[in-house]
Image: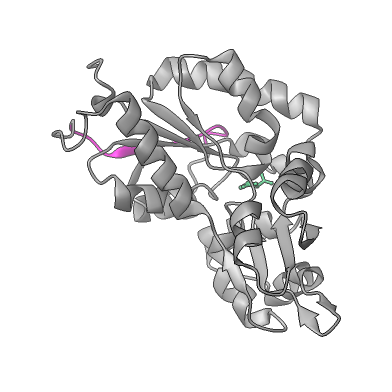
Amino acid sequence: MNDRSSHRPILMFDSGVGGLTVLREARVLMPDRRFVYVADDAAFPYGAWEEPALKRHILELFAKLLDRFTPAISVIACNTASTLVIDALRDRFPGHPFVGMVPAIKPAAERTRSGLVSVLATPGTVKRQYTRDLISKWASKCHVRLVGSDRLAPLAEIYMRDGFVDEEAVRAEIAPCFVERDELRTDIVVLACTHYPFLANRMRKTAPWPVDWLDPAEAIARRAVSLLADIDPNGRGEVLPEGADLAVFTSNRTDFPTRRLLQGFGLAMS
Ligand code: DGL
């Protein structure tokens, strides 16, 4: 493999198919790049793991992934993982650039007019100290409601493979995001799990009133572009090496709905 980082892939990482919402934005901004999409689906859902065990697990997995793919950068397209392990990954692999993905609390606090913001995430992300620190740092003037859901990420997995969504379940999961106080209403819901943008239409449909559903995927893809420009300023626009982008599923699953989904995203199973 050529040493130039322009010839090395970008590794996009999630516990399941959620990171595909970030991959699609990254592809638009970096059509000249190769990607390896890694779904740690053997360990899905991350939202249910205890913190020390999940941290150990991700660090061990990354040692193997970096060795196998020598990516130019890695994007942790998973809030549940990033809020736990992004600092530990940077410490453990100091030569390797990581882009993390944490709840978009700062932009939500800047945009809200009512001052009522909700953060919809996995139970793991909701209980992280990292998330609490983001709120005290950027949103101390807002009323932020943290809403943990253990059903939405699995619902998005089913939807992306089988095309079916339990709308009543979506309605019930998002309902706690909607707060009314002193004649003001929640006006922004932060989608703080990369699976959720796949359900955004159903969320809009079942919401009690319209809100801005804040998905930071494009901002994360932009961050990856600028990080790559820093590490390899002359690397853009080079001819691509042959071959499709790859998908790695840690469970090695090869069922038809998964293969069809990956094909739709232009990914070949490794
Ligand atoms: N997609 C992941 C995130 O952004 C979470 C899904 C899971 O629970 O594993 O938080």
Left or right: 213, with 32 as reference point: right
| Residue at x 77% of width, y 54% of height | 140
Task: Report x, y in % for residue 200.
Answer: 57, 69
Is residue 185 located in the magenta-colored stretch of the structure? no
| Residue 260 location, quadrant | bottom left
Instruction: Say which residue appears at 21% left-offset and 29% top-offset.
Output: 235
In the rendered image, the quadrant that contains the N terminus is top left
- Residue 142, image quadrant: bottom right
Residue 250 located within the stretch drawn in magenta: yes
Residue that protrudes farthest toward the right in the picture = 182
Residue shown at 60% from the left, 16% from the top: 91
The residue nearer to you, when weighing 236 against 58, is: 236
Give the residues drawn in magenta, as a range: 242-252
Locate the C terminus and report the quarter of the image it occupies: top left
Residue toward you, 137 or 239: 137
Up/down of 197 relative to 31, above or below: below
Q: Is residue 264 visible?
A: yes
Q: Position of residue 59 (x, y in %)?
A: 62, 20
The picture quadrant where one finds residue 203 is bottom right
Q: Is residue 142 left or right of residue 38?
A: right
Q: Position of residue 99 (x, y in %)?
A: 50, 35
Horizontal side of 163 relative to 106 (left or right) equals left
Q: Residue at x 77, y 25 (%)?
A: 53
